[in-house]
Structure formats: structure tokens, C-alpha cells
Amino acid sequence: MSGTTPANSRRTHVTNEARAKPNPNKMISRFRTLGLIAALAIAPVAHAVPILGGNITLTEDSLVTVTFEGYSAGYTSNLSLDMPTNGLGTLFTNKTASVGSTLTLGTFAAGTELIFRLFVHDTGLTFFTGEASRNPDNVAHATVNAVGNTHFVGFEDLFGGGDRDYNDFKFSVATKAVPDGAATVGLLGLGLGVLALARRRLN
């Protein structure tokens, strides 16, 4: 019939119009999703920051291991645990230790600060982790970067702070929680070992 639009044609026309009209709710949802993706893309990644003069203090009774992480220095130096008092002696020597070498220091009670000592053979000087006042030049010589249960430590081996790159001797200290009382037993055993060593030297 002339001038009449077939029913199928009208349905197709309506369907196309419906498809052409944007759904405001869907558009808002898409914008929110894109905004979230963009925010995640530009968000800064969180990293622990090395602290110059930082210390290593246990927050719980822990089994402690130390790992040699390498060095970049002309001088030869030894690392040892200065405090608590122990009979462990030299842990690593930078020029001879293999990167990744690990030693178990023992178990220590919560609240214990582990103070490490770096002895530099070429100058005869000794530097410590922690505050500047522990060192002969009154300058902090080690950075401490805590990542989870591991502290990454870097020493500067030159008097006065040197070039302050803190990579002359690098090591990490990992802690693992132990049952209550185990740290006390471990410290007692360490103390007995020190006494035995002292007696052998006297004899």
C-alpha cells in the first residue's frame, strides 16, 4: 500500500535508534573503571627507605640469620656481631665471602638490638651500625632498610663518611619468630659458649 511503512521496517528502525542511544548508567560505570585503571597505573610503588643510622631491634623472640650481599670497596673489611656479647667472631670478610653466604646467629629475645661492627683492615678503624656517636668520627656509617622480616644493611668504610655510597660492605639480617622461651635458651647457650671459649684461652 502506498505511503505505508512495513511493520518489519518500523521494528528495524526502532531497534537501530535504541542501539544508537547511549546508556548513561553504563557510561558512568565505564568511566569509573577507566579512572580506577588510570589511578593504579600512575600510583607510586611503595618501597622501604634506607635509614642512615637506623638500628636493628627485634620486635619478637626471633631466630636470626645473616647473609652476605656483596661489596664495592678497595679496602678489606670484616663483619662481626658486636652486641649482644657473643663468641661468634668474624662473620664475613668482604674480599673472600661469597655473595649469598648465610650464617645463623642464634635466637634472641624481643627488644634486643643487634649491633654489627665493621673492622677495616687497611685503616685499622672500626664502625658500627646505629647512631653516629658509636663511631670514632661521630658520623653514621650504615644504612638500614627494613623490608618485611629482613633488614638490608650497607656500610661506608671511610672515616668522615667517605663518598656516602653505603655499599662498601652489604649484608642482610633475617628474623623468624620462635616460641616463647626459646630465645632465652638460645642466649643462655651463647653465653655458655663464650665462657667455654674464654676458659680455653686462659688454659
Image: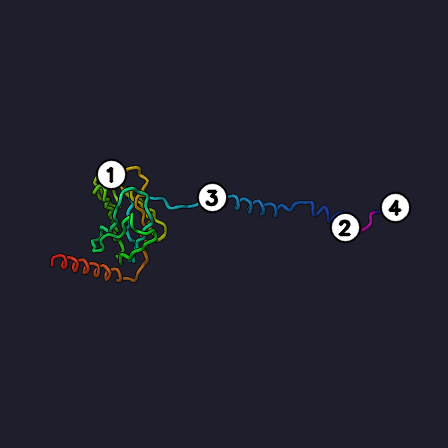
Q: Earlier in the sequence, mark 1 or mark 4?
A: 4
Q: What amino acid is labelled 3 in the image?
A: Ala
- Residue 98 magenta-highlighted: no
Q: What amino acid is labelled 1 in the image?
A: Phe
Dividing the picture into quadrants, the one containing residue 159 is top left
Q: Residues within 10 Å of mark 4 (few under 14, many from 20)?
A: few
Q: Position of residue 28 (x, y in %)?
A: 59, 45
Instruction: Identify the residue under disc 1.
Output: 159
Q: Position of residue 5 (x, y in %)?
A: 82, 47
Q: What amino acid is labelled 2 in the image?
A: Arg
- Helix, strand or loop at disc 1? helix
Colour setting:
rainbow
Dividing the picture into quadrants, the one containing residue 176 is bottom left
- Residue interval drawn in magenta: 5-12
Instruction: Identify the residue under disc 4.
Output: 2
**Distance of mark 2 from mark 4, alpha carbons?**
19 Å
Q: Nearer the viewer, mark 3 or mark 4?
A: 3
Q: Position of residue 123 (x, y in %)?
A: 22, 41
Q: Residue at x 31, y 37 (%)?
A: 163
- Helix, strand or loop at disc 3? loop
Q: Nearer the viewer, mark 2 or mark 1?
A: 1
Dominant secondary-structure state across the stretch colored magenta? helix
Q: Residues within 10 Å of mark 2 (few under 14, many from 20)?
A: few
Instruction: Identify the residue under disc 3.
Output: 43
Question: As rendered, which of 196 and 36 lies closer to the eye?
Answer: 196
Q: Earlier in the sequence, mark 2 or mark 4?
A: 4
Q: Position of residue 26 (x, y in %)?
A: 61, 48
Q: What amino acid is labelled 4 in the image?
A: Ser
Q: Earlier in the sequence, mark 3 or mark 4?
A: 4
